[in-house]
Amino acid sequence: MNAGSSIIYTIVRILLGGMFIGHGIAKFQMGLANVAGWFDSIGLPGMFGYVVAYLELLGGVALIVGFATRYISIIYVLLMIGAIVVVKLPMGLLGNAQAAGFELELAYMLAALSLTVEPARGWGLDRLLFSRQSSTVSK
């Protein structure tokens, strides 16, 4: 394992987790009922607002500690595809005077996608848990 790629993998994982935690906290500060109302207003079940808020917050924590990185990242890729298609696509990549485009969601999606295709690298619980398991199995 290349030390440089392990460091970069860890940095991307921690920063992506931190950004999602920030978005999750913002939803809790807004009030989950308000978030659910916004989801209703765009034609999605309001319950999705609660699910997204918890996914962002708890999934972000999981990414920071490096637990279930691949699975959380797959969920985030799907979440970002949904956000782009359902909400942001009409605004275009860079947006317009009224609303931001989907460049941020695209960047989040690509960072999460990179974590799904790479093996568990860097420092985190995934590497600790799965490295021991694979070395035990091979003996």
Image: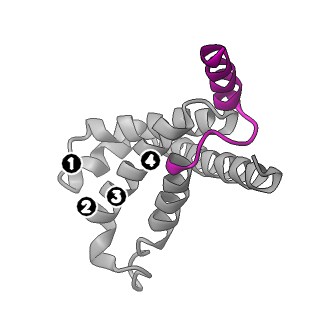
Cβ atoms under marks 1 and 2 closer than 8 Å: yes
Q: Earlier in the sequence, mark 3 or mark 4?
A: 4
Q: Which residue is mark 4?
A: 76
Distance of label 3 from label 4 (alpha carbons): 8 Å
User: What residue lies at 17% left-to-right and 53% top-to-bottom?
Assistant: 43
Res. 131 mark: none
Cβ atoms under marks 2 and 4 closer than 8 Å: no
Q: Amino acid at mark 3?
A: Ile
- Comparing marks 3 and 1, which lies closer to the viewer? 3
Q: Secondary structure at mark 2?
A: helix
Q: Which residue is mark 3?
A: 81
Crowding near the residue tagged with mark 3, few <14, some 14–19, many ≥20 C-alpha atoms within 10 Å: some
Is 92 on the left-hand or right-hand side of 105? left
Distance of label 2 from label 4 (alpha carbons): 15 Å
Q: Which residue is mark 1?
A: 44
In the image, is residue 44 above or below residue 125?
Answer: below
Front residue of this view, candidates 118 and 25:
118
What is the span of residues highlighted in magenta in the rendered image? Answer: 117-139
Distance of label 4 from label 1 (alpha carbons): 18 Å
What secondary structure predominates along the stretch shown in magenta?
Answer: helix
Q: Amino acid at mark 4?
A: Tyr
Distance of label 1 from label 2 (alpha carbons): 9 Å
Q: Secondary structure at mark 1?
A: loop
